Amino acid sequence: MSGTSLPSDGSTQPAAALRDEIAQLHEAVRSQRDIGMAVGLVSARFGCSTEQAWRTMLRVSQDSNTKVRTVARVLVATHDDTADAADAAILDAFVDQLPASGWPTGPWTGEDPGP
């Protein structure tokens, strides 16, 4: 934990602080998982090393002013066919920043993602 100490007066504030910290840690774990999956997807999709995939995601994040965790979440959702219209809008904001071979389209675009 972050060193949150419990007061001796028995107040409930530390419990709320601990709940908040636990929620933040859960979100961090989800973000790390999505980032790891997205790095693997980018690496496989564009035939590059994981280091190159990570650098690509960083560049996409910076160039599109989108957080890396959001870039990762949208790429994973697109790959899993769980992306919604909001994810499609976010993807549109940075898809031009990906390597030239592009990223697969999904059912929300009305395009056939098949071969």
Image (cartoon, rainbow, N blue to C red):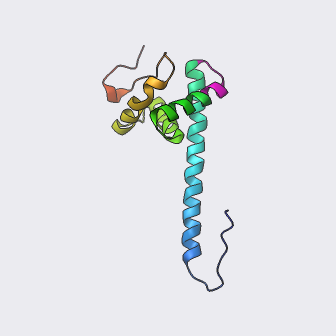
The residue at 39%/37% (across/down) is 87
Which region shows up in magenta?
47-53
Compared to 14, does 1 lie above or below? above
Q: Nearer the viewer, residue 2 or 74?
A: 2
Residue 71: horizontal and vertical position, in percent?
A: 49, 36
Q: Quadrant of the C terminus?
A: top left
- Residue in the image at 51% along x and 19% along y: 99
Q: Quadrant of the N terminus?
A: bottom right
At horizontal 61% and vertical 31% (from top left) the residue drawn is 54
- Is 114 situated left or right of 39 in this image? left
Residue 97 falls inside the magenta stretch? no
Q: Is residue 9 left or right of residue 67?
A: right
Q: Is residue 91 above or below residue 5?
A: above
Image location (x, y in percent) of residue 65: 46, 37
Looking at this view, is 28 or 58 the one in front?
A: 58
Q: Is residue 52 magenta?
A: yes
Question: Quadrant of the rendered structure where residue 11 is?
Answer: bottom right
Q: Quick one: which residue is furthest to the bottom in this view?
A: 9
